[in-house]
Amino acid sequence: MQRIVFACLCAAVLAVLPACSSAGQGVAGASAASTGSTSADSATNESSSGSGSTSSDAAPPAETSGTESARPPQGGQGSLTVASLPIGANADGDGCLTISFEGAASEVPAGMTLVVTGIEFKPQVVQFGGSACPQETPVCRPGLVLTETGNDQCFASITMGGAAVGTSVQVQVKANVDCTGGQVAACTQFKEKIDSDEKSNGIATFEVPEPNQPETTPTDQSPSPSESAAVPSDSVTTSSS
């Protein structure tokens, strides 16, 4: 009887052992798989971290310093603004203004032009208008172009706006230096010479003149006193003694 019971116990133990061994292998396999996944994730993270570190350590592009020189547009033409040209100004009694370009403004180099962009008066009661000098050219106005072979003077009719005779009026002419052929350096030198001449020349002024009186044409001419006093020869009588 005891042998039979012992044999049954042994059989039960042998039946249980394979199941336990299989479960242990499964647990070990899962653990190994988990460990491998963790290692792969860690390697991936290290790779990403390494690439990010390389990116952040890259040197930034070099920065340039200093003032950038003027460059001509694509058409090969550059433009420099001149605050005021060296000029002289005068107005006559009819209201005809003459502006004379002086210094560098009268010596425009070849391949460059001076383009007038504005003409200002102080006091502002003096303005363009009227017809005092319609036959004189070129006309002083924005858009007037001065060249190497151009005129050194321009003319314009002005109104005095009730300004008193003798009032000093300031005149300022602004312009652009336009260059062709990429002569940026030469244009810059020309502009600087204009600025220097303008400072040396001072502000151009003229005085409001006495208005000219309109000419009158007499229709009836009266005899002069000498003519009226003259006695005709045929009116003289002689008396005989």
Image (cartoon, rainbow, N blue to C red):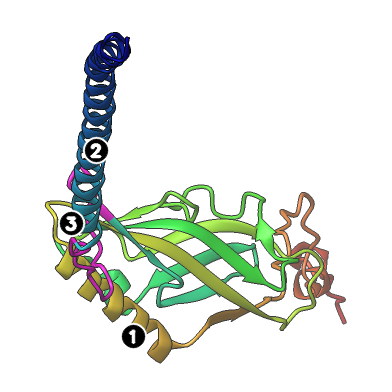
Gap in Å between the C-alphas at discs 1 and 3?
A: 56 Å
Quarter where residue 57 is shown = bottom left
**Image coordinates for residue 140, horizontal then vertical, percent:** 48, 56
> Is 173 displayed left or right of 18 in the figure?
right
Q: Residue at x 25, y 13 (%)?
A: 3
**Image coordinates for residue 164, horizontal then vertical, percent:** 80, 77
Cβ–Cβ below 8 Å for labels 2 and 3?
no
Classify mark 2: residues with Cα within 10 Å, few (<14), some (14-19) or many (20+): few
Instruction: Find disc 1 in the rendering and name its residue.
Output: 196
> Is 111 displayed left or right of 155 in the figure?
left
Q: Identify the secondary structure beneath mark 3.
A: helix
Dominant SS type (magenta): loop
Instruction: Find disc 3 in the rendering and name its residue.
Output: 54
Which of labels 1 and 3 is toward the front?
A: 3
User: Which residue is nearer to you in this view: 176 or 107?
Assistant: 176
Whether residue 64 is in magenta: the answer is yes
Instruction: Find disc 2 in the rendering and name its residue.
Output: 35
Quarter where residue 100 is shown = bottom left
Quarter where residue 167 is shown = bottom right
Which of labels 2 and 1 is toward the front?
A: 2
Give the amino acid type for the residue marked by disc 3 in the picture: Thr
Cβ–Cβ below 8 Å for labels 2 and 1?
no
Q: Identify the secondary structure beneath mark 2.
A: helix
Cβ–Cβ below 8 Å for labels 1 and 3?
no
Give the amino acid type for the residue marked by disc 2 in the picture: Thr
Which of labels 2 and 3 is toward the front?
A: 2
Q: Residue at x 52, y 83 (%)?
A: 203
Q: Relative to 113, does residue 229 appear above or below in the rendering?
A: below
Give the amino acid type for the residue marked by disc 1 in the picture: Ser
**Image coordinates for residue 121, horizontal then vertical, percent:** 63, 69
The answer to which of marks 2 and 1 sits earlier in the sequence is: 2
The answer to which of marks 2 and 3 sits earlier in the sequence is: 2
